[in-house]
Amino acid sequence: MRLILSRFVACGQGATAVEYGLIALFMSGAIIAGFPAVRDAVQTLYETVSGSVASAGS
């Protein structure tokens, strides 16, 4: 067991996998946290365009 653990620590690939996992975790958290702001902005844009199209048709 000690040999396997020492190989894992010395190899460096395990650390790289953990780092990539943390990067993916933080990126997904930022996307989830920013989603409501993007949703509201898109909804406002659609409402503006809808109002413009409706007023142009009358």
Image: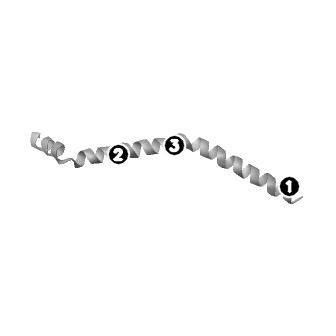
Tell which circle, 3 or 1, labels the residue nearer the N-terminal end.
3
Secondary structure, mark 3, is helix
Classify 10 Å Cα crowding around label 2: few (below 14), some (14-19), many (20 and above). Answer: few
Farthest right residue in view: 58
Asked if disc 2 and disc 3 are in contact, CB closer than 8 Å, the reply is no
Farthest bottom residue in view: 57
Q: Circle 1 is placed at which residue position?
A: 55
The residue that appears at 13% across and 42% down in the rendered structure is: 6
The residue that appears at 38% across and 45% down in the rendered structure is: 23
Q: Tell me the kind of residue under disc 2.
A: Gly
Task: Indicate the quadrant where residue 26 lies.
Answer: top left
**Is 35 placed left or right of 22 in the picture?**
right
Which quarter of the image is occupied by the N terminus? Answer: top left
Q: Tell me the kind of residue under disc 3.
A: Ile
Which quarter of the image is occupied by the C terminus? Answer: bottom right
Q: Circle 2 is placed at which residue position?
A: 21
Q: Position of residue 14 (x, y in %)?
A: 24, 46
Q: Tell me the kind of residue under disc 1.
A: Ser
**CA–CA distance in space, label 2 to label 3:** 16 Å
The residue that appears at 66% across and 49% down in the rendered structure is: 42
Q: Residue 32 carries which label?
A: 3
Q: In this view, does 32 lie above or below 50?
A: above
**Is 33 placed left or right of 43 in the picture?**
left
Q: Where is residue 41 in the image (x, y as percent from the top left)?
A: 65, 46
Classify 10 Å Cα crowding around label 3: few (below 14), some (14-19), many (20 and above). Answer: few
Secondary structure, mark 1, is helix
Classify 10 Å Cα crowding around label 1: few (below 14), some (14-19), many (20 and above). Answer: few
